[in-house]
Amino acid sequence: MKYVLVTGGVVSGLGKGVTASSIGLLLQACGLRVTSIKIDPYLNTDAGTMSPFEHGEVFVLDDGGEVDLDLGNYERFLDSTLTRDNNITTGKIYQSVIDKERKGDYLGRTVQVVPHVTDAIQEWIERVANVPVDGKEGPPDVCVIELGGTIGDIESMPFIEALGQFSYKVGPGNFCLVHVSLVPVLSVVGEQKTKPTQHSVRGLRSLGLTPNILACRSTKALEENVKTKLSQFCHVPEVNIVTLYDVPNIWHVPLLLRDQKAHEAILKELNLSNAVKPDLAEWTARTKIYDTLQDPVRIAMVGKYTGLTDSYLSVLKALLHASVACHKKLVIEWVAASDLEEITAQEAPDVHKAAWDLLKGADGILVPGGFGDRGVQGKILATKYARENQVPFLGICLGMQLAVVEFARSILGFHDANSTEFEPETSSPCIIFMPEGSTTHMGGTMRLGSRRTYFQVADCKSSKLYGNAKFVDERHRHRYEVNPDMISEIEKAGLSFVGKDETGRRMEIVELPSHPYFVGAQFHPEFKSRPGKPSALFLGLIAAASGCLESVLQTGGKVNIVSKNGVANGSAMGKVHQNGNVYSNGNGLHH
């Protein structure tokens, strides 16, 4: 097993996750099998209880793991299926060590950070690195490990010590360290400054880790004299110093690394002489098409976390994958749900008008998942506008639940219809707490992970978008569900529950047959969307907003794919299999 460790220095938010994903993709394009591990030094057991404002979206895996959004990057880039163990946190490590101590596994020894915690970290890495994530038998060839945070952080010290020991343990030729650092350009002098990177590398070396490759973030490509200076002071060969300069979109990053021969440097450090030349032809073609898209499709995103786009990262990527597939330039109109509400009209009429103008100017409306009652009325108003004005609509998780609430209020006349999440005493509980949920513990107690949805109506739009499949497997994350006791009444009024779970009592997909595209899903289809394999329901939304839904439905969820020469052809980019993925023969892309 070979290991590539990606660390970050100087400041956070440099793009370690994108760099690690790009390295993984590049090695995969060289014919190697790749897996990924993300280390998060925080004390939380997982990301499940953290606010999106704190750490961006919570990404959900097939096995129900609630993990860091960087694992979403890895899955999209490498088209892999990771597990909760691919995300290591301080909380998980300490919990496992304390559990062993309570069982008496340490035989009376004093349990310490070194060696017990550091050993636990190394054992975890070795165990997970050997688990295949690409659906094939046998262990992967390379494991790309991303260490979260910045070198010098107190909370990451046990991991740095463990990784220092680990690099010695696996030996030279099996371990490559890529350090991502910042080379700022001061506007006053316009000169690229190397001192922050020098100090970062010095700190890294003092902690027992020596970088083999420097990946320098900067606004433009590094000048030759700057590379020479970095090589001299950081003890890294010039050929092993690459620039990650600003690019039009993130899809260019693997191409940047390839053009600077980063794969050759990594393969040399890992003694992998049998790898082939990286084949990124299809990736390159798709990136060029993305760069040249002109015809816009406007989607109004009505949510409560609109101030931080990372809160909806997977939703944004799923919209992007679908819009590129439909050859449309995606334009997101961010609408804060609370700005649509009547109280905002009284307190800030200009803000209220601007929000409604954005909503009314959109080609499609998306209401994503969320928790808490802030902005709920605004989301219901947006849903009502989409339903009444024949605007293509997609509601995800809470968005689907609120579509049911709005229908019950407007069509059935249940004016107090609500979710018990927001109004426990409502006389018309359309949405109820799931019986198996916990009312005392927050973490890991929701209905999580991959669950099967069976189509009840063969010719519904959703089934056609999924390639006329009988069922699909999609990822879930919810505590509340549509009240099964109200289903027959709602369906009689015209709202159709076209997808249900295996019991037939849990509603998964809702459609309004009389509407051009009004779909709600209890699951989160965005988590399985891939650039060459857009999510079926997102493809439906973009196609409907672009006026080409009928042609997509007639071909069973197929759209044109990018061929290796950059020309669109008629093969299936969107042929969706029964597991809910869309299949093509291309590499998966992320951003």
Image: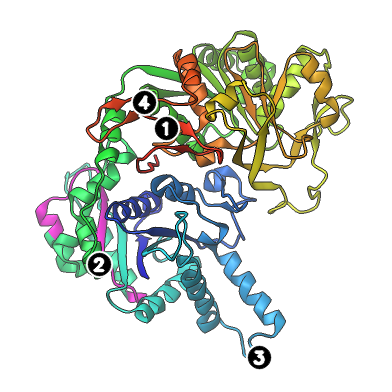
Mark 3 or mark 4: whose residue is earlier in sequence = 3
In three-dimensional space, the C-alpha distance between marks 3 and 2, rounded to whole angstroms, equals: 42 Å
> Circle 2 — which element?
loop
Residue 207, compared with residue 303, is above or below; it is below
Depth check, mark 3 against mark 2: the one in front is 2
Query: Which is nearer the eye, 458 or 361?
Result: 458
Residue that appears at 39% across and 23% down: 326
Mark 1 or mark 3: whose residue is earlier in sequence = 3
Q: Which residue is mark 4?
A: 560
In three-dimensional space, the C-alpha distance between marks 1 and 4, rounded to whole angstroms, equals: 12 Å
The amino acid type found where label 2 is placed reads Leu
Circle number at residue 107: 3
Magenta-colored span: 206-227
Q: Residue 13 location in percent, x, y?
A: 40, 49
In three-dimensional space, the C-alpha distance between marks 1 and 3, rounded to whole angstroms, equals: 54 Å
In three-dimensional space, the C-alpha distance between marks 2 and 1, rounded to whole angstroms, equals: 33 Å
Q: Which residue is mark 2?
A: 272
In three-dimensional space, the C-alpha distance between marks 3 and 4, rounded to whole angstroms, equals: 63 Å
Residue 123, compared with residue 448, is above or below; it is below
